[in-house]
Image (cartoon, coloured by chain):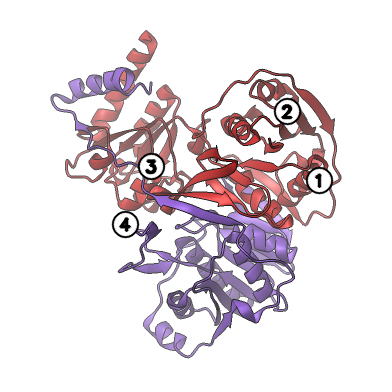
Amino acid sequence: MKKVLVLTEAKYGSLRGVSLEMLSAAHRLADGGEVIAVAIGNEAIYYANELGKHGAKKIYIVGNKELDMYITEGYSQALQQIIDMVNPEAILMPHTAIGKDLAPRIAARYDLGLISDVIDVQVVNDVVIFTRPIYSGKAFEKKTVVSGIPFATVRPNNIPMKEINGTTEIVRLNVEIKDIRTIVKEVVRTSTGVVDLSEAKIVISGGRGVKSAEGFKPLEELADVLNGAIGASRGACDAEYCDYSLQIGQTGKVVTPDLYIACGISGAIQHLSGMSNAKIVVAINKDPNAPIFQVADYGIVGDLFEVVPLLTEEFKKVLVNS
Amino acid sequence: MNILVLIKQTFDTEEKITLQNGKICEDGVNFIINPYDEYAIEEALKLRDLHGGEVTVITIGPERSENALRTALAMGADKAIIVDSEDQELDEHSISKVLAAVIKGRKYDLILGGNMAVDYGSGQVGPRLAEELDIPQITTITYIEVNGNQVIIERDVEGDKELVESSLPVLATAQQGLNEPRYPSLPGIMRAKKKPIERLEIDDFDFEDDIDAKTVVTETYFPPKKDAGRILIGEIKDQVSELANLLRSEAKVL
């Protein structure tokens, strides 16, 4: 039995799916022990119920105004005070922009090992085993912590959420924040879609075949209908058809959606490693010999500018009928 | 200003991964500088050319990693340090402790590195080292400007842009889009041969804390291989409706 601390995360006011996925992982780890959630920001009161339904026995809501925007030093001070208070026997954080920045800092502060970007957690004979992709998904490794408590960051979209009945206690508190050396001056929201690429269940991705920035238009229309996110290959980013933040592959993001639709992407090995662990891959390409077809579950050999708008129309019909 | 750049030698991203006795096999593999670290080197060179000072590249790795340092020197870095890690089991905890020991006592204003390495991809060493040195960190940066003792940085946050200000010294990790790294020039390669490389061993340092790895790999394996998929045939219109049906009824992802 372990007491597990989970740092939950919300974005633009709504709880991120990975928060609930972590709670489910935390329950496996806790093995009957207590799962404690931390939420930063008073708006957490609106989703505390959701955390409770997924097994958070206690929720610490940190209300400091200074933490309205993520700053490494502010968040690490807050987490440090909570860790010292709770004395957890395992810690989980999300493998998101915040977790990636914060978790290693906390790990170093407590001289803890940290296993990043895990996609699975199992407890076998009291040993906690984490699974994570390496070489951006070309291979996997299993890791364990040999000294200190288990600490990991969890990749969104991989561990199934699970509802767990029980009662929840909410504790609101303020922490002491001091000596901050960095200031966030401005945040410019440039991400186009509402759905974040790393958490999207459906990703529509464009390559050199989209030919221009305007060429992404039909893909965006398809993404709208499917409530998906837009991604891109390195080729499309290098040709400046889109921003690098959309890049999927070994030097970009690794995504594991339920459905990945590759449009005009030939499928270089670096790209394949970033997406080939998607549940279902659809490839649309003019070249029947494109390597992307080797990892695709379904392929259409054809011009994306003809196929994609037809697909959008088709899905509109299908989804209306369902 | 003095800039330290942390680099790692990694497999070329074109390489396929093979296993030998359950471990990743390095035979015949082409090694490169981790692409994210290349952005860090390039940015350091630009800042040095603008503000003066020197750029020192640092790596921890086996002997082959020296090639990565030579490349960085050929790009224009002034000095290099290698800490030999041959036959040592190091994790991110150990690596950042060793780096902190190398860096403490040296003069620096800015530490740059990649935001992650394309091999093990944990992205821990930058923030861990910043904590060890008790300096602020700014990760996944796409722009940096130094004004006296202050830096203005733009960082990528899952596609959004954040403008951050910090005092120096600071540790920043590079994201794609920061710059376009230069190729080493021929004169650069010639000059690199005369530039100093400081060779250190882990045993050279007295560590206050335990640097033993806190985590271990128990198994490395490949994802299950996917069967070749189905290429649809017929009129494009029919293929499209077939696909929509398959995704709904067979794949059940819609």
Give a yes or no on whether discs 1 and 3 share a subunit. Answer: yes
Q: CA distance from mark 1 to mark 4?
A: 44 Å
Q: CA distance from mark 2 to mark 4?
A: 45 Å
- Which chain is disc 3 placed on? A
Q: Which residue is mark 3?
A: A275
Q: CA distance from mark 1 to mark 3?
A: 39 Å
Q: Residue at x 32, y 57 (%)?
A: B18
- Which chain is disc 4 placed on? B
Res A62 visible: yes
Category of crowding for the residue at label 2, using alpha-carbon neighbours closer than 10 angstroms: few (below 14), some (14–19), many (at least 20): many
Q: CA distance from mark 1 to mark 2?
A: 22 Å
- Of marks 1 and 2, which one's residue comes earlier in the chain? 2
Category of crowding for the residue at label 1, using alpha-carbon neighbours closer than 10 angstroms: few (below 14), some (14–19), many (at least 20): few
- Which chain is disc 1 placed on? A
Q: Which residue is mark 2?
A: A44
Question: Colour in which chain B is shown?
Answer: purple
Question: Of the residues shown, which amino acid type is indicated by label 2?
Answer: Ala
Q: Residue at x 26, y 23 (%)?
A: B243
Question: Colour in which chain A is shown?
Answer: red
Give a yes or no on whether discs 3 and 2 share a subunit. Answer: yes
In what quadrant of the picture does the C terminus of chain B appear? top left
- Of marks 1 and 3, which one's residue comes earlier in the chain? 1
A279 is higher (above) or lower (below) than B16: above
Q: Are marks 1 and 2 in contact (CB under 8 Å)?
A: no
